[in-house]
Amino acid sequence: IQETQQFLGKAFALSMCLMALVLMIQFNSVWQTFVTMSEVILSSGGVFLVLWLIDRPFGVVMCGLGIIALAGIVVNNNIVLIDTFNEFKKKGYHSRNAAYHAGLARFRPVLLTSITTILGLVPMVFGLTIKFSDRTVLIGAPSSQWWTDMSSTIAGGLTFATILTLLATPALLVLGDSGNQLFLNVWNK
């Protein structure tokens, strides 16, 4: 278990570093990269909350893999929102208006991506195995027990992360832009 935990810890750290590098190249902004990466870390709170609510232990292997997969989904949703924010800024919108319009424009895509992912994971969360050949549904089959932890991790974390993406990301973008403007005003004086 310790070897697996160390390997997954290294894999998570490496994936976070690679994501941060790609985001820095894409956004050309330390703040926007920080916002996106902080959403990944904060979504882990949703993972632990859901595991606590459904009274499941944190399995190092499957929950660890779930958190790594969750990080990719969370980053994707934030990229969509931040890219739209940057497009509105290029069109001349003030940061508050750009964040508002980006949130409106990307509300449906972010929400639909999250909802379809969560609904697709629901059978695994509840331990359902569907045997199409026999046209039967098994509850708690041995094969489903492996996937329950990972699917619960992704579904719970994504639920929490979607709320963060739609509310916290625009707020942090405005905060960062206001801080940048304040810094430039002080610097130019």
Image (cartoon, helix red, strand yellow):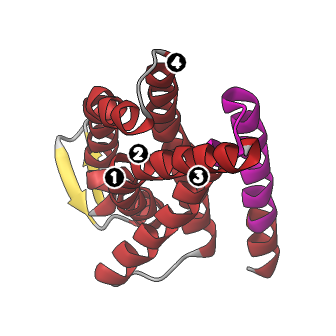
Over which residues does the magenta segment extend? Answer: 9-33
Badge number at residue 167:
1
Badge number at residue 179:
3
**Which residue shows up at 17% across the image and 40% down it?**
135
Badge number at residue 8:
none
Q: Earlier in the sequence, mark 3 or mark 1?
A: 1
Q: Is residue 186 visible?
A: yes
Badge number at residue 90:
4
Q: What is the crowding at mark 4: few (fewer than 14 residues within 10 Å), some, or many (at least 20)?
A: few
Choose top left, top right, bottom left or bottom right for residue 46. bottom left
Check whether the beta carbons of the residues at disc 3 and disc 1 lie within 8 A of each other: no
From the viewer's perspective, tell me whether residue 90 is left or right of residue 117: right
Identify residue type, mark 1: Leu
Q: What is the crowding at mark 3: few (fewer than 14 residues within 10 Å), some, or many (at least 20)?
A: few
Choose top left, top right, bottom left or bottom right for residue 128. bottom left
Label 1, label 2: how far apart the Cα atoms are: 6 Å
Q: Earlier in the sequence, mark 1 or mark 4?
A: 4
Check whether the beta carbons of the residues at disc 1 and disc 2 lie within 8 A of each other: yes
Task: Please name which of the two marks, 3 or 2, marks the residue nearer to the observer.
Answer: 3
Check whether the beta carbons of the residues at disc 4 and disc 3 lie within 8 A of each other: no
Check whether the beta carbons of the residues at disc 3 and disc 2 lie within 8 A of each other: no
Q: Earlier in the sequence, mark 4 or mark 2?
A: 4
Residue behind mark 2: 170
Task: Please name which of the two marks, 1 or 4, marks the residue nearer to the observer.
Answer: 4
Would you say the magenta stretch is mainly helix, strand or loop? helix
SS of the residue at dot 4?
helix
Task: Please name which of the two marks, 3 or 1, marks the residue nearer to the observer.
Answer: 3
**Which residue shows up at 34% across the image and 33% down it?**
97
Identify residue type, mark 2: Pro
